[in-house]
Image: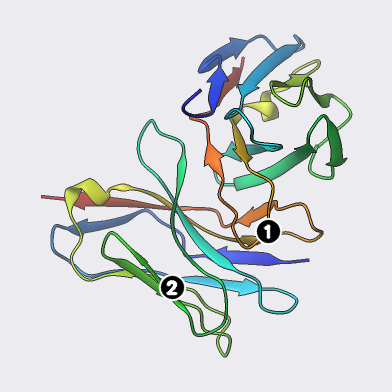
């Protein structure tokens, strides 16, 4: 598609439920990133995919968080047994491979997750 | 690891006022530095970047100079407009060769007519 698409745009869930957040990157973008934007916390890196593999998962806050990417395209971020502190905007970004000086990310508009 | 500190907001200015948003960083070596902007309801967009010390990035009337002596990358604009109202993030690369970015906390700018 023309941009990075994330769904749903808004999600309200009850504490303890599992949620899945979807990211559809720009076609041909091999690198994909998930970030979390919490009130007062800025943007935190969660996980990086190159193709279908995730060489950097260092930002995942707990084992309740997991992510996968299939076909080098769509990625799903899953949060199990959601807690109120998981409430945030989850952002996805993709970019082409190439020199890191480029950093030509395209960000999606995010999924706003509210855990009640 | 690399880190960035950004002035807290919100910043409220009148139209045509001068804008400065402070950003300082801690890093190994001299990484590229970035400013991203998030307009209401939209995803982050790259506003400007500087890839080496003393470089000046500029776009849409905004400027930032990479100053290694003060480890700073302050964002400036001489005359802000209502349409500049947004959240601004300073960023630099994280450790490792993954292309991930480390962001500041963001500064909300509100420009009043």
Residue that carries the numbered disc 1 in the rendered image: A99
**Label of residue B74 in the image:** 2
Q: Is label 1 in a helix, a strand or a loop? A: loop
Residue A91 occupies quadrant:
top right
In the image, residue A110 above or below residue A9: below
Q: Is residue A63 left or right of residue A109?
A: right
Q: Please determine if labels 2 and 1 lie on a single subunit.
A: no
Name the chain under label 2. Answer: B
Please tell me in which quadrant of the rendered image residue A25 appears.
Answer: top right
Label 2 environment density (alpha carbons within 10 Å; few <14, some 14–19, many ≥20): some
Picture quadrant of residue A6: top right
Q: Name the residue rendered at 76%, 40% in the picture.
A: A48
The answer to whether residue A24 is above or below residue B41 is above
Q: Residues within 10 Å of mark 1 (few under 14, many from 20)?
A: few
Secondary structure under badge 2? loop
Residue drawn at x 60%, y 54% as measured from the top left: A103
Q: In this figure, what is the number of numbered marks?
A: 2
A109 horizontally vs B29: left or right: left
Q: Residue furthest left?
A: B113
Compute the Cα span from label 2 to label 1: 25 Å
In this picture, residue A2 sits left or right of residue B58: right
Residue B1 in picture, x, y percent from top left: 78, 66
Q: Kindly check if marks 2 and 1 are in contact, taking CB atoms under 8 A apart as contact.
A: no
Q: How is the rendered protein coloured? A: rainbow
Q: Say which residue appears at 21% left-offset and 52% top-offset.
A: B111
Q: Position of residue B83 (x, y in %)?
A: 21, 46
Q: Position of residue B19 (x, y in %)?
A: 28, 67
Outermost residue toward the bottom? B69
Mark drawn on residue A74: none
In the image, which is nearer the foreground, mark 2 or mark 1? Answer: 1
- Left/right of residue B57 with respect to residue A100 in the rendered view: left
């Amino acid at each position: 598609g023309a941009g990075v698409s994330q769904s749903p745009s808004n999600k309200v869930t009850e504490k303890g439920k599992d949620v899945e957040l979807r990211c559809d990157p720009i076609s041909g973008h091999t690198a994909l990133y998930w970030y979390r934007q919490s009130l007062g916390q800025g943007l935190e890196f969660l996980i990086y995919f190159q193709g279908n593999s995730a060489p950097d998962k260092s930002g995942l806050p707990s084992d309740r968080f997991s992510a996968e990417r299939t076909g080098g395209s769509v990625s799903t971020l899953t949060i199990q047994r959601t807690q109120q502190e998981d409430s945030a905007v989850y952002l996805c970004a993709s970019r082409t491979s190439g020199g890191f000086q480029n950093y030509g990310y395209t960000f999606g508009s995010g999924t706003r997750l509210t855990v009640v | 690891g690399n880190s960035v500190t950004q002035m807290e907001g919100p910043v409220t200015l009148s139209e045509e006022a001068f804008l400065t948003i402070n950003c300082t960083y801690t890093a190994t070596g001299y990484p590229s530095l970035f400013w991203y902007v998030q307009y209401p309801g939209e995803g982050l967009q790259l506003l400007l970047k500087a890839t080496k010390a003393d470089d000046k990035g500029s776009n849409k009337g905004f400027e930032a100079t990479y100053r290694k002596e003060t480890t700073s990358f302050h964002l400036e604009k001489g005359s802000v407009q209502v349409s500049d109202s947004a959240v601004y993030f300073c960023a630099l690369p994280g450790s490792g060769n993954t292309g991930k970015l480390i962001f500041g906390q963001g500064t909300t700018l509100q420009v009043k007519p």
